[in-house]
């Protein structure tokens, strides 16, 4: 296939949500429409179960299974859809943030009763930072939830984005009758059906059509007309350019488990969502149309079986055409590498592929050469920017319990950090290793893997830090004063950047006040 034609066909996106809003269910329904799976339940079974919080081996086992479904690709109405899965489990939030660097747009799922939740806000913050186009799907309309207009207001105020409804619910909860697609001027009627695809679609070109009264009753029809009029009065007409710029989020309503509103979402999605986009590098912007291949690694999945130490690096292709068995530059290592068995993740199977195009994600078998953020290119030596680190929330100091194994420990820690399991901050004096994570689970994972894969025994001692902020300043004198005054709270990250570890939000505020010429960054994106 020709490279440029391939770009136009692809749509690469992620489905994100606060846990339990219905991300897995919606993903599964999208796959059903695409024919990628035949029955409901196939994706669900791979989901990390909530009950597994205290049993990380079980989670890792499930994560192992879910490698195959990390990227789900299928064809729908002439487009190749690549859905990148993001772990819903809070402890893997960092994984999700990184995956967002590899997508071109997202669908954000919100529960109509819970509205905007904690993780919804954080995910949206990451999207806003990157100007990622967002579509919002308000789910569970078959349950009694908040009033749709109230929900729209909440989205705007809490998520700091303008919204524009492109579908509208008729009733809610027990009275939920269906979804009117504003974008396509179609009425879809509600028939709870958990596995198949809704067929009862009636099309209208005018909401005043008397047939609507016949179908949903006069009261419902009048309410719908009133609502639509209000929407037109309050919200600006949908402007695709604004959506693509990340300035307005179109909103859809439905019930994923009942397969309702999903088709409206998908049909509109393939029309409005962006084709693969370029990415910024240290030597300028790279467009997908650029003939030379380039891509970056955004995720590394390790095999926990010590007999098979291979890892899979997930590479997002940004430009050109990737070919099997062709030498490419591993820019950071200044080394040429070729890949005999690159895999695609079409549906549930992992297949060896011969070529791949911008927007695609491929798996490369790796024996430890890659780390997150690495760039692979055909000719030029440039590096993609922007796989940011986010401030962890839990900090513990690593203590070696077997001094004879410190080499193994250092090697193990380095590799785990390259995979993005956690972040390492080094504190002086004494070269103290502070490990920061978003969830408690990662500490168990680290201890287990250090012992079983690297033969190193260690323990963790809690440190009372609240947040890590990356610090920069144009005023080196003030920076030096700060570093001197806060010795016990400063450290360097894996790349040698200075970090301030604050015990409480108040102490961070004080530092910001006392040292006005120092910038305290919540992510490393600015670097
Ligand atoms: P997540 O990936 O975002 O964490 O959510 P998931 O899809 O697993 O959905 C969370 C729960 O919400 C599931 O119920 C699911 O069945 C339910 N759900 C999803 N969509 C809808 C919807 O449109 N309406 C209603 N009423 N419920 C919905 P569960 O009890 O946790 O699991 P299950 O055993 O029922 O599958």
Image (spheres, rainbow, N blue to C red):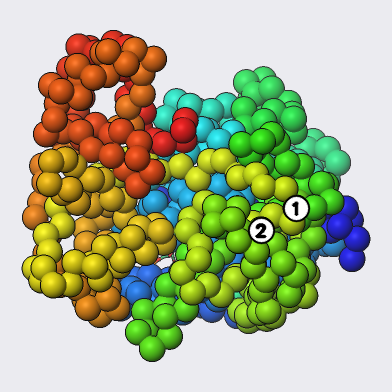
Residue drawn 28% across the image and 34% down it:
499
Residue 426 image-quadrant placement:
top left
Residue drawn 16% across the image and 40% down it:
428
Quarter for ligand 1? bottom left
CB of mark 1 near ligand 1 (< 8 Å): no
Q: Pointer 2: residues within 10 angstroms few (<14), some, or many (20+)?
A: many
Query: Which element type, helix, strand or loop, lies under badge 1?
Result: loop
As measured in the structure, the alpha-carbon distance from the residue carrying label 1 to the one carrying label 2 is: 7 Å
Image spot of residue 381 (x, y percent): 67, 47
Please indicate, yes or no, whether residue 337 appears anywhere in the rendered image.
Answer: yes
Left or right: residue 472 versus residue 370 is left
Left or right: residue 241 versus residue 369 is right
Rendered image: mark on residue 41: none
Taking depth in this image into account, of 233 and 94 the one nearest to the observer is 94
* Residue contact at pointers 1 and 2, CB within 8 angstroms: yes
Q: Pointer 1: residues within 10 angstroms few (<14), some, or many (20+)?
A: few
Residue carrying label 2: 329
Image spot of residue 282 (x, y percent): 61, 36
Residue carrying label 1: 379
Left or right: residue 59 versus residue 163 is left
Query: Which element type, helix, strand or loop, lies under badge 2?
Result: strand
Please indicate, yes or no, whether residue 12 appears anywhere in the rendered image.
Answer: no
Taking depth in this image into account, of 204 and 1 the one nearest to the observer is 1
N-terminal of the pair, mark 1 or mark 2, is 2
CB of mark 2 near ligand 1 (< 8 Å): no
Residue drawn 26% across the image and 13% down it:
478
């Amino acid at each position: 296939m020709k490279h440029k034609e391939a770009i136009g066909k692809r749509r690469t996106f992620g489905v994100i949500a606060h846990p339990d809003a219905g991300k897995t269910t919606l993903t599964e329904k999208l796959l059903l429409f695409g024919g990628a799976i035949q029955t409901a339940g196939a994706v669900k079974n791979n989901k990390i179960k909530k009950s597994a919080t205290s049993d990380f081996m079980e989670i890792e086992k499930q994560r192992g299974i879910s490698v195959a479904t990390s990227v789900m690709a299928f064809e729908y109405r002439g487009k190749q859809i690549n859905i990148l899965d993001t772990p819903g489990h809070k402890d893997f939030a960092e994984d999700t943030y990184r995956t967002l660097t590899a997508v071109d747009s997202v669908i954000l799922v919100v529960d109509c009763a819970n509205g905007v939740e904690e993780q919804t806000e954080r995910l949206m913050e990451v999207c806003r930072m990157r100007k990622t186009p967002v579509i919002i799907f308000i789910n569970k309309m078959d349950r009694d939830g908040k009033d749709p207009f109230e929900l729209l207001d909440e989205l705007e105020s809490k998520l700091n984005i303008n919204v524009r409804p492109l579908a509208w619910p008729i009733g809610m909860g027990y009275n939920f009758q269906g979804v009117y697609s504003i974008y396509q001027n179609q009425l879809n009627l509600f028939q709870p059906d958990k596995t198949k695809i809704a067929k009862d679609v009636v099309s209208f070109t005018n909401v005043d059509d008397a047939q609507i009264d016949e179908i949903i009753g006069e009261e419902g029809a009048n309410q719908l007309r009133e609502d639509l009029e209000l929407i037109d009065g309050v919200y600006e007409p949908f402007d695709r350019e604004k959506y693509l710029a990340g300035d307005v989020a179109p909103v859809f309503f439905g019930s994923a488990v009942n397969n309702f509103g999903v088709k409206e979402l998908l049909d509109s999605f393939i029309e409005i969502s962006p084709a693969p986009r370029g990415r910024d590098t240290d030597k300028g912007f790279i467009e997908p149309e650029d003939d030379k291949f380039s891509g970056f690694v955004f995720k590394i999945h390790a095999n926990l079986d010590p007999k098979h130490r291979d890892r899979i690096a997930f590479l997002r292709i940004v430009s050109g055409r990737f070919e099997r068995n062709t030498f490419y530059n591993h820019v950071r290592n200044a080394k040429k590498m070729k890949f005999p068995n690159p895999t695609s993740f079409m549906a549930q199977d992992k297949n060896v592929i011969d070529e791949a195009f911008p927007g695609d994600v491929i798996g490369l078998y790796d024996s430890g050469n890659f780390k997150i953020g690495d760039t692979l290119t055909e000719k030029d030596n440039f590096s993609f920017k922007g796989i940011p680190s986010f401030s962890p929330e839990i900090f513990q100091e690593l203590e070696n319990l077997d001094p004879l194994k410190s080499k193994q420990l250092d090697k193990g820690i380095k590799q785990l950090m390259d995979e993005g399991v956690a972040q390492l901050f080094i504190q002086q004096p004494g070269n103290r290793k502070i490990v920061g994570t978003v969830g408690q689970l990662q500490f168990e994972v680290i201890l287990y893997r250090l012992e079983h894969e690297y033969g190193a025994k260690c323990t963790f001692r809690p440190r009372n830090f609240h947040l890590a902020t990356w610090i920069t300043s144009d005023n080196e004198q003030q920076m030096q004063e700060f570093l001197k005054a806060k010795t016990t709270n400063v450290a360097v990250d894996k790349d040698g950047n200075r970090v301030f570890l604050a015990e409480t939000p108040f102490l961070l505020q004080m530092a910001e006040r006392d040292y006005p010429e120092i910038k305290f960054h919540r992510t490393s994106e600015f670097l």
